[in-house]
Image: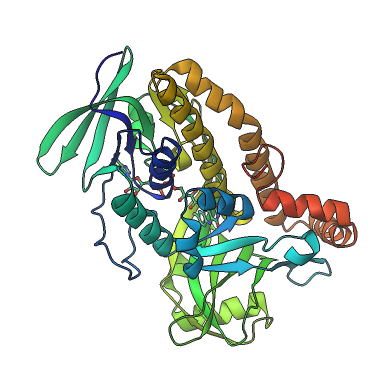
Amino acid sequence: MPHTDYDVVIAGGGMVGASLALCLDRFSCAGLRVLVVENFPLPPLSDEKPAYRPSFDARSTALSFGSAQIYEELAMWPLLTEHICAISQVHVSDRGHFGSVLMNAASQGWPALGYVVENAWLGNVLLSQLRKNTKVEFLSPASVESVSVFQGYASLSVREGDAVKEVTTQLVAIADGADSGLRSQLGIGASIDDYHQVAVIANVATEKHHDGCAFERFTERGPLALLPLLADESGMSRSALVWTFPEAMADEVAAWSDEEFLAELQRNFGYRLGRLRKVGQRGAFPLRLMQAEEQVRGQVAVLGNAAHSLHPVAGQGFNLALRDVECLSRLVAGAHRRGDNLGDLALLQKYTSSQRGDQFVTTTFSDQLTGIFSNRKPVLSLLRNLGLSMLDITPPAKSQFVARAAGILPGAAAE
Ligand SMILES: Cc1cc2nc3c(=O)[nH]c(=O)nc-3n(C[C@H](O)[C@H](O)[C@H](O)COP(=O)(O)OP(=O)(O)OC[C@H]3O[C@@H](n4cnc5c(N)ncnc54)[C@H](O)[C@@H]3O)c2cc1C
């Protein structure tokens, strides 16, 4: 086997790249030589919430029960608990229609249906853990400009300021996001289904406490989710908003003042959380279903948003990526113990075969939910409302739906 500088190089230290580095280090008992190359400078090591940065931005993420178990195994969960808010119930409704459904953790016999964490805090905990308690190395700010694959190894051109250097590795993990330049550079195509929608995100302070309830509401513009967050420093109750609009409205919504935005949100969401008091920094994300045509080649694995990016309506994208990361890391750690090449195509194909079912079901679930709940046609609206009512009175169907949404159906990591 050719000698390489590293065993695994991860291009992109966002939510997926950083989680992969931690998994690899833990599952190999710090036996792997792992390098993370990240475009953006690392934040200072501190217990403060850091400034927003790519990936770890103003969004919040609903972590499934399955993801919580993975972070538990990585010894990350105790560090995250002070920053997460448990989802004890989910209320799904359709504005101006009769159907609604309430799912709660207690009736499933679970401690929570999921957990909400602000991305900036997730980043703080992940990056601090990696820097303080693992052997993982960072090159940051630095970017991987290109990847070349040879027999048994890959060579990466890495730019750090004005200097470009070559780094060799057995396996390169491409985790540079949905617009992955490296996926294109390798000639890996992607199928793109544009939803022609944008997700507008912001934290919203509310008069009433959410009591751990997450709301999913279908409005004439598109689905709207309010996920429970921990209270702010002044004790004010907050929820994280993800509101989908047709892309044609993106500029208009961006131009709304905070007062206009809150008034429009109040009109669409109603008063379940009392008066909506304040809105924080807003962001907008164009929404597409993107799937890479290849996820592995000899010495190369494509992960996270670079491999598949989903509509956020069901909060599944990162949870799925984390299950991928766990599966790949276990296989790579096993190959390392046996002294095998970590970029061996047969090994990487074992990874894609293991995850294929989960990826297919999760992607289809998110895509179908988007289709059903973004459509205002009267017949579909009636069916949707009948569906919500049926779901509410049919316990097995409801349990299946809740378990799927929580990422713990067959194929998921929590089994
Ligand atoms: C509005 C919204 C809400 C969401 N909510 C949820 C949710 O509740 N639950 C859930 O499971 N999922 C959710 N998702 C999905 C989730 O955000 C994504 O799965 C996740 O961000 C993917 O992370 P990533 O690390 O693959 O990519 P990114 O977050 O795009 O990170 C890529 C990283 O690579 C770096 N980079 C790029 N190019 C290079 C290069 N050449 N060299 C070095 N570094 C590079 C970037 O600086 C960045 O740090 C949501 C998505 C959206 C849009």
Residue 137, position as x, y percentages in the image: 26, 42
Give the colour scheme of this rendering.
rainbow
Q: Is residue 226 visible?
A: no
Q: Depth check: 304 or 407 in front? A: 407
Quadrant in which the N terminus appears: top left
Q: Dividing the picture into quarters, in which one does residue 57 lie?
A: bottom left
| Image coordinates for residue 111, horizontal then vertical, percent | 68, 63
Is 81 placed left or right of 8 in the picture?
A: right
Image quadrant in which the C terminus is located? top right
Q: Is residue 63 visible?
A: yes
Residue 351 placement (x, y as % from top left): 53, 27
Q: Is residue 372 above or below residue 326?
A: below
**Total tally of numbered discs in the picture:** 0
User: In which quarter of the view is residue 135 placed?
Assistant: top left
User: In the displayed structure, does residue 146 sit left or right of residue 118?
Assistant: left
Residue at x 73% of width, y 51% of height: 403
Q: From this viewpoint, which residue is outermost toward the left?
A: 162
Q: Residue at x 87, y 52 (%)?
A: 396
Q: Is residue 313 or residue 319 the one in the foreground?
A: 319
Q: Is residue 370 left or right of residue 162?
A: right
Residue placed at 24% from the left, 34% from the top? 145
The image shows residue 128, relative to residue 155, as above or below, that is below
Between 138 and 51, the residue placed more toward the observer is 138
The residue under the point 42% across, 25% down is 337
When the figure is inspected, residue 20 is found, relative to residue 248, above or below; the finding is: above
List x then y, in percent, for residue 295.
48, 28
